[in-house]
Image (cartoon, coloured by chain):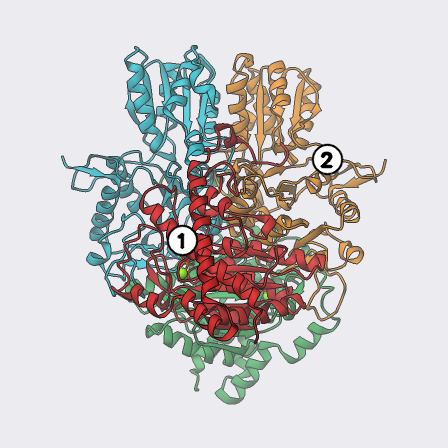
Chain colours: A red, B green, C orange, D cyan
Amino acid sequence: MSYDPIMLLDAYRRMRAIREFEERMRREVQAGTVPGFVHLYCGEEAIAVGACMHLQDTDYIGSTHRGHGHCIAKGCDIEGLLLEIYCKQGGLCNGKGGSMHMADLNKGMLGANAIVGGAPPIAIGAALTAQVLGNRGVALAFIGDGASNQGTVFESMHMATVHKLPMIFMYENNGYAEFSGASWHLGGGDITRRAGGFGMPAVKVDGTDFFAVYDAMAEAVRRARDGEGPSSIEAVAMRWYGHFEGDMQTYRKKGEVDELRKTSDPLPKFEERATREFGLGVEELREIDEELREIIDEAVDVAKAAPKPLAPELYTDVYGSY
Amino acid sequence: MSYDPIMLLDAYRRMRAIREFEERMRREVQAGTVPGFVHLYCGEEAIAVGACMHLQDTDYIGSTHRGHGHCIAKGCDIEGLLLEIYCKQGGLCNGKGGSMHMADLNKGMLGANAIVGGAPPIAIGAALTAQVLGNRGVALAFIGDGASNQGTVFESMHMATVHKLPMIFMYENNGYAEFSGASWHLGGGDITRRAGGFGMPAVKVDGTDFFAVYDAMAEAVRRARDGEGPSSIEAVAMRWYGHFEGDMQTYRKKGEVDELRKTSDPLPKFEERATREFGLGVEELREIDEELREIIDEAVDVAKAAPKPLAPELYTDVYGSY
Amino acid sequence: MPQKNIRDAINETLKLEMRRDPRVVVIGEDVVGGLGGSSGVEEAAGGTFGVTAGLAAEFGRRRVIDTPITESAIIGMAGGAALTGLRPVAELMFIDFIGVCFDQILNQIAKFRYMFGGKARVPVVIRTMTGAGLGTGPQHSQSLYNMLANVPGIKVVLPSNAYDAKGLLTTAIRDDDPVIFCENKAMYLDACEVPDESYTIPFGQAAITRPGSDVTVVALSRMVTLANQVADKLAGEGIRVEVVDPRTISPLDTATILGSVQKTGRLVAVDECNPVCSFASELVSLAACEAYDALQAAPVKVTAPHTPVPAAPDLEQYYVPSLARIEEAIRNTLGGSTASARKVV
Amino acid sequence: MPQKNIRDAINETLKLEMRRDPRVVVIGEDVVGGLGGSSGVEEAAGGTFGVTAGLAAEFGRRRVIDTPITESAIIGMAGGAALTGLRPVAELMFIDFIGVCFDQILNQIAKFRYMFGGKARVPVVIRTMTGAGLGTGPQHSQSLYNMLANVPGIKVVLPSNAYDAKGLLTTAIRDDDPVIFCENKAMYLDACEVPDESYTIPFGQAAITRPGSDVTVVALSRMVTLANQVADKLAGEGIRVEVVDPRTISPLDTATILGSVQKTGRLVAVDECNPVCSFASELVSLAACEAYDALQAAPVKVTAPHTPVPAAPDLEQYYVPSLARIEEAIRNTLGGSTASARKVV
Ligand SMILES: Cc1ncc(C[n+]2csc(CCOP(=O)(O)OP(=O)(O)O)c2C)c(N)n1
Ligand SMILES: Cc1ncc(C[n+]2csc(CCOP(=O)(O)OP(=O)(O)O)c2C)c(N)n1
Ligand SMILES: [Mg+2]
Ligand SMILES: [Mg+2]
């Protein structure tokens, strides 16, 4: 496969944006400035970006409680996201959604979702819209390894096969669901084999390898756009941090994450190949790094300084018409 | 495999009882004497009986809206069943359950269930009890082809594999879910392949062949009792009648059922082999037929004549203690 | 004007709206039927009770969409389709099945607009069947609309006749918010005059089906029919019963209800739900909090008891509010009391 | 007597009951934690908030059962186990997740005994977390217990302090009916005196946490704490507030509530549920129907508004009933009215 360097630069920018964003969020949570539960995406950047590089604003994604990375990969505005995480006026959802319920329909982002397994049924609805309108749109649901056990997820896969929906099930196997390991909670099952049982192509890839995700996704998107129905991709990439910020992670052996950082960091992995094989310049990547750091610094400042929603807003937006 | 003739006689008796019972119910529904929705089991007798011949009263089954056959196969009292279907005093559930909710815990029958996919989660609970108490008990859920698409069913299979529960998933693929055919509603999926994806042994058998069901079940029960975990069996046997009594069945081609009666009637199939290979006498089978006809005739008379539940019973049995 | 029953009025409304707007699609189990069947017939069902009959023939299977038995996926898919440009009318065959898909209603569809800061439109209608009385037992006879009225973000509609069914369903399909449309399964053949052309009935506007000044009876769905009958009977005795049919319970026309109570000073709330946290309790609470000074007697609730719906028709008849119990409640609140109806309940 | 917080009181109760009866098992997501983890640690969680900590060490994983994320199977399995001889205590992590397993509660567990003609015993407890105030947003902050109170066949318990939590949970585990045990997530660290030994508190028996004669405030769970504080404050002004904590809302101690209203003539119902068909509406309805003659003023409801729970803490503080709103309601029903608390709501 060959890759457009402009696409690759864009992909790098998005992965780096996620990394910077999440590392900053981590420090902010530790400093106590962020309300609610926060679940970080570090280590899994290549999944969201490898997937979303194939999608337009008119394609849709359904997300999870660990949704920051999906939002950034799908092109949501960084400042809008931060304002939302800080629950401020002008946030993507005007502060009513917060970290676990961020959405941006204009960018085809159907919402983070604090109900595990909540998003796939919604995402197949977006796929149905594309099918009925015949607009070659596709929809994708990000689904955790833990979420892969939820009945709603199986139902969604099944419905998608019956109706040959233009749908992609992107499983993010990050090794854990809360404080339990996937090797246990998947029982005798295997995400990919289960998906295959529903009669759709199902592949397993290295989720820390942007190119692996991107390639698998290319075929899944082609199938979907050509009306051939749904596909499943299981991307394996351990999460670097706890289930939520504050998790003591006693279930992990010491040094596991240090090891991951060394051997499986999606960013250096990408950079190595992209610079070696596809001519990206290390220089320009560092410029991107710098630029993103500034953007995020500024956006965090803006978010912190922004006004809180006013009390009467509690009552608005329940209905479109009353 | 060799078969105990006493067991075979018993199996015949149960299958014949189901057939007589259901044919009689059909005439009664047509005569307008039966309240509520009634779903008949004719054509599928070998599944319930092939399964239940391996079970004791202390083993449990979860059933469906099409539950008469399961009840009879599991040893529930015929008169108690009829009283219940007629919603009379003395019915298995004192008339509060009716055809779609009959249960008999003393016989290990956890209830017919009018919620499609409702029973499997309950059945794995019975399997959990057996596991925790270490009593070598097993549980089995009957699940229709249509029900096999319900999230609760997938969740139950998964939970059973994770905990290696002594559980059997007995899929009754009778070709249709209401007015839609299984070849369509299963999409690209296949019941057995899907079950296999969860990591349990999964086999497909001819559900009109008692011996095939019985043999598959023998291994599944052994595994379960020996603590090796759950199994799935898909037994294929078309239903002879409509989804419910009254269904016009325009989705079926003319003559389909006549053909089934000729080629795939589980009773003659059983009789042929049982008399030829295992020494059952045609004479004694005819005596059983006669006897059952009388039992059912009498029980229907009893049920029709029995007193209705009295108004105050509306208010009882909501709680054990108030 | 032509007479039409509720089933046909709903069917006609679906057709009119699908003709009017290509984004309207119908989704559900056996809304057409016959796929995968051996006869190859085009339509084997048209809905369990025939409500969606003929839709596929006119609009094709791309817009009239059969599904497997998988309610979470049905409702979620309808919600997701609504978020992204369709206007789905999903069918939840019986409201009792809400348990297998409740998250998609409670936490997803109902909350999208709010969670997303007002930036979502969620034009989805969920048609479903409610009500006891047909001997269908504990899992096919419930009402449960009280639970839905409790959920912010959805609208809840309960038509009591064919004319209202058409007008309210038209409004529901054109509305940009999620609507649960409750069809009482015992009423499909109830007929009245229904115009052929489209019309809308606004949400949150109660109908006074019997004007009166002695006592206010608020009733819903099939209970309106019973309340009207009792009102007619008592009119013969000179008792002027006002029957108010809210038609939509979320939003609720509190002004009309309170206005009536202010006039009559007496309230009987008739409701097929189980009593605790029921819609009847809500009505009584509304009157007690907002029309306290006008009340001249204790309000009376006529509801199902705190029991599941029994399968036995002989018990079920005592489960559902009856003419006798409604009449007794009216007499009670007027100060009299007939012993008769108390016998059983 | 030792001081214990609610978390520890519940943990201790589970241990005592598991020691007492080998049929008691605990089932839920990460009630232990750590299986399949790389460290091999014995217990990585003990419940999200540590409520089940140490159980596995004492009783082993055969009785303290971790599960995948699969709530329908968890709740159904617990129900089926209860039908067949165990006494499971299942954990539904947040009550908001009820949507993904509601059928197993609504149509299965709650109805077994009735559908089966009284021949089933269903000794299952579902522990779950309710309540807003921690900034956890629309899908992790709901109350929803009103919906459960509506369902015949289950009992619904909401302790307001550690002493009650222990006594009520003991009763729940020993009860042969399904019980939903609602733990307010903002109260786990609230402590009071709790004996070390086992004791039971009967269901359907309200506690009067503040005796008074001017106005009755009925409150639940965390709202009891607020109501007590307001009562204490107003006592300084000579206003004698009686605070009634029903403790169980199904069954409900109507006698104590009505007795109090009969005495005071005034009712304020405080409830964290959304208002329509809420438990507050049920309380007002109870008083209006059954204590009509005693009422001296319109009852007042203090509830959450008809909106989802917003993520923004700055909005959430107006969502949850507050000291100010309770105080205002009390003054209103007493005839006075302070403008202050109205500002926002
Ligand atoms: C229906 C439901 N059940 C349980 C939870 C609690 N919970 C939140 S995240 C989570 C683990 C999810 O694991 P996984 O799907 O692997 O996603 P990850 O956190 O690893 O990204 C759980 C159990 C929930 N939010 N919703
Ligand atoms: C949750 C739920 N959805 C839908 C229905 C309506 N319904 C009753 S039986 C049935 C078909 C079931 O098909 P299958 O599982 O194949 O069983 P069969 O009738 O063929 O024995 C349907 C859709 C229901 N009772 N419950
Ligand atoms: Mg995970
Ligand atoms: Mg079938």
At a point 64% along the width and 37% down the height, the residue shown is: C157
Q: Looking at the image, which residue sits at the far bottom?
A: B277
Give the chain of mark 2.
C
How far is disc 2 from disc 1 in space, using C-alphas?
A: 54 Å
| Horizontal side, residue D266 vs residue B194: left or right | left
Work out whether residue C105 or residue A90 is closer to the camera in this orientation and state it: A90
State the SS at label 1. helix
> Where's residue D215, x and y in %?
37, 16
Q: Name the residue under label 1.
A: A22
Residue C140 higher or lower than A156, as above or below = above
In the image, ligand 3 is in what quadrant? bottom left
Q: In the image, what residue type sits under mark 2?
A: Asp
Q: Name the residue under label 2.
A: C164
| Horizontal side, residue A187 vs residue B237: left or right | left
Q: In the image, what residue type sits under mark 1?
A: Glu
> Where's residue B275, x and y in %?
53, 86
Assess disc 1: are there few (<14), some (14-19) or many (≥20) residues with their C-alpha within 10 Å of its C-alpha: some
